[in-house]
Image (cartoon, rainbow, N blue to C red):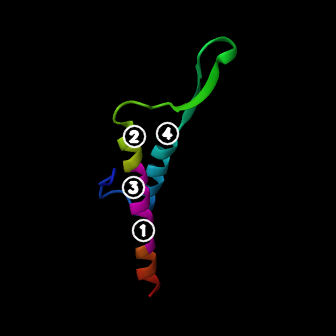
Amino acid sequence: MNIFRYDDYSLEHSLKQVHVLKRVMFRKKEVKHGRGKKAFVKREYVYNQDGDEEIRNKILNSIKHYETKLETISKKNNK
């Protein structure tokens, strides 16, 4: 399932937009857990709600989709 389904976007532009979404959704921040000497810092996603893991998977699948589509078009044009 792709995130973008607009006819106005070219494949290159759609791939670029999905990479921007990836950069936003995979951003992490340091969160301190505990107190005192036993405290530790853990890196967690900034956007970590219930449906965000599904969105991350959709973003990765969309990147794979657009990259393979661009490869097949470039192979078709080279023949």
User: For the N terminus, which image quadrant?
Assistant: bottom left
| Residue drawn where x is 63% and y is 25% of the image | 41
Dot 3 corresponds to which residue? 61
- First-in-chain label (4 vs 3): 4
Q: Count neighbours of disc 4 (C-alpha within 10 A) and say few if under 14, some if 14 to 19, many if 20 or more.
A: few
Q: Residue furthest front?
A: 38
Q: CA distance from mark 2 to mark 4?
A: 13 Å
Residue at figure coordinates x 29%, y 58% from the top left: 7
Amino acid type of the residue tagged 3 in the rendering: Asn
Q: Position of residue 4 (x, y in %)?
A: 33, 52
Q: Which residue is mark 2?
A: 53
The quadrant of the picture occupied by the C terminus is bottom left
State the SS at label 2.
helix
Q: Which residues are magenta?
A: 59-71
Disc 2 marks a residue whose amino acid type is Glu
Kindly identify the amino acid type of the residue bearing the numbered disc 1.
Thr
The residue where tag 1 is placed is 68
- Disc number placed over residue 39 in the picture, else none: none
Asked whether disc 4 touches disc 3, contact meaning CB atoms under 8 Å apart, the reply is no
